[in-house]
Amino acid sequence: MGAWAFYITTLLVYFAVDVLSAFSLNLQFGYAGVVNFGFIVFQAAGAYAAAVVVLGPSGGVASFQQYVFGARLPFPLDLLVAAAAGALLSFVVGLFALRRMRRDYQAAVLLIVSLIALQVVSADVPLFNGSNGLTGVTWPFGEFFGATATGQPWLYLIYSLVICAVVCGGVWWLSRSPWGRSLRAMRDHEDAASAMGLNITSLRLQVFVLGGAVAGLSGGLLVEYIGAWSPGAWGYAETFVIFTAIFVGGVGNYRGVMIGTLLVPIIFLEIPRFLPAIGYPGLTDSLEWVVVGLAWMLCLLFRPRGILPERRLRAPRAEGVALDPAPAEGGA
Amino acid sequence: MAGQLAVDASSSPETPAVGSPPVLVAKGVGVGYGGVRAVDDVSISISKGEVVGIIGPNGAGKSSLLGALGGQVKRTQGVITLGDRDISSLMPHDRARLGLVRTFQTTSEFARMTVYENLVTAAEGDRGASLRSVVLHPRQTAQRELELRARAWSIMERFEMTHTADLYGRELSGGQRRLVEIMRCLMRHPRVLLLDEPMVGVAPHLTGKLIDDLRGIAQEGLGILIVEHALEVVRKLCDRVVVMAFGKVIAAGEFEEVVRDPVVQAAYLS
Ligand SMILES: Nc1ncnc2c1ncn2[C@@H]1O[C@H](COP(=O)(O)OP(=O)(O)O)[C@@H](O)[C@H]1O
Ligand SMILES: [Mg+2]
């Protein structure tokens, strides 16, 4: 495979991973109004979990990298473990971070969780090899197709696109269900939603755990492709990349979210990484963040609801109801 | 006049039977914010088919009392029973599922949902919309959607709001928002309706219709507790009036006698 083909395939694998992340965040934020500023932690949990269940038994202190609970699980257990790790961590964090308090406080707590987790994992070497992180993560199809996924990028691309399509389809379907409608009611007015019989605490925890599972899965999918995972990969800023993607694309509109994901993490952030370096070392890296910030600002100024705004769902008519002239499609 | 057993000779035919057992009873309810006692030892009861008005100057504790009844505000003392159940320490959604629903002083429509969605969402929460039933029982969920659809349209027809079905909550006028809140409550087949100043924002020429609508709803067997400052509305709408000032009930009874009460007049003037 040529360098270009490999490059394109890799970008598309990243795209699949980022779409999963963005769907998860859009379910939590766009539908339920949960501002998960700790999003990346749950992706990282999935990545670490998948890594340790495909790396094999840990060699302990003697080996070049240390980690807890080494195992070698076959597909699909590796990804299920990743999703479960994201879900479980979300449940634990959600239990205290999502208690009845103002949403901005919840967001702040989650951001702090994200910072603390990064410090803990960096400092605690026996857990996931500290700041050096884990390397040599293989994929579960090694015995059939070669040790690493990067050896079979096409195969991995198809694999990740299929998983992405199935999971995102599920997220979309749930969002459109009466359950998803309850989430939007909670987003729009918590007190009114609970006064109408919706259990806010439980709904919020459900969407947080479900989103956490999808985040964990995306982490597992990513780590098995790139083969390594370290604290450098999950700084809190990564969360804001995904937030920018859904804001640019259109909060609450999954098609828009896909466009935003293509634009922000892929076209704005990944592509410049492969451009020839300009200026002093690290300039392009910094410029990327400028670009992301600008994208968000321009979007807020000119298309505050994103490229494709949330769509109005027209009410299904009941039989025997006289149809009034349709109201004008109005923006407010 | 359905469902009424006996009519007290002294009251107009509109007032409910004196003998009908109260559906919502609050005894000695108190609400405090920090050191402030916003509601102090208030007792109140509402019967089926009855409209009870709460009046009183600003800051009297009317909204706080409604909050304590609905569960939005923490109650510091007292007991609240709905039917024969003590609901004093239930969460708001559990009270709603038992049939106690409310509107808010500041309108609380779901702003980025259509009027239709505002209505059908309100009927969920006890069955039908849980994650489990959506995933495991899609057929029942779909069936329930059809029932809700029919109910939502008939309620919108009743309030002449079908033309707004596809409008977002945030696109409505103030009066329409009030109606959406009330329609949303009715979706749940409530036993008791708590209304916090539902006439604010309603165009003057429409208040008459809303009064008729609310009377009609009460006659179907609901108890309504309404906070209202327009005395004219209270006079037309309410069977009984409770006057609050400084967190306490200072008078209660029929509208005409209550407003003549010197204590009440003093509270309003001060
Ligand atoms: N959330 C709150 N925190 C602190 N004080 C409050 C709060 N809500 C109401 N109060 C106070 O409680 C008293 C009663 O308020 P409220 O119940 O809104 O009265 P009303 O509805 O009769 O105007 C007022 O003095 C008000 O300032
Ligand atoms: Mg008030």
Image: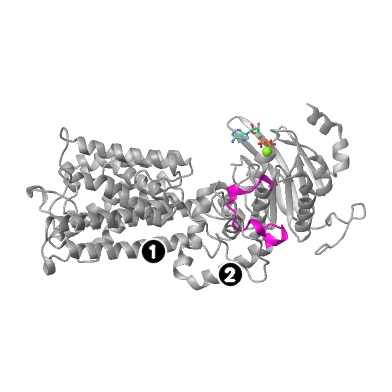
Ligand 1: give its quadrant.
top right
Residue at x 12%, y 54% (from the top left corner): A136
B196 left or right of A184 in image: right
- Secondary structure of residue under mark 1: helix
B166 left or right of A261 in image: right
In which quarter of the view is residue A273 placed?
A: top left
Q: Which mark is residue B26?
A: none
Establish whether labels 1 and 2 are both on one chain.
Answer: no
Place of residue B217 in the rendered image (x, y in percent of width and height, measured from the top left): 75, 58
In which quarter of the view is residue A281 placed?
A: top left
- Secondary structure of residue under mark 2: helix
Q: Residue furthest right?
A: B9
Mark 1: few/some/many CA within 10 Å (<14, 14-19, 20+) = few
Q: Which residues are magenta?
A: B155-175
Residue at x 45%, y 70% (from the top left corner): B136
* Residue B167 lies in the magenta stretch: yes
Mark 1 belongs to which amino acid? Gly
Circle 2 chain: B
**B25 or A201: nearer the eye?**
A201
Say which quadrant the N terminus of chain A sits in: bottom left
Q: Residue furthest bottom?
A: B139
* Residue A281 lies in the magenta stretch: no
Mark 2: few/some/many CA within 10 Å (<14, 14-19, 20+) = some
Q: Which mark is residue B146?
A: 2
Place of residue A249 in the rendered image (x, y in percent of width and height, measured from the top left): 39, 50
Q: Is residue A73 visible?
A: no
Place of residue A112 in the rendered image (x, y in percent of width and height, measured from the top left): 34, 38
Residue on which the image places disc 1: A170
Q: Is residue A158 visible?
A: yes
Q: Residue furthest top?
A: B270
Mark 2 belongs to which amino acid? Leu
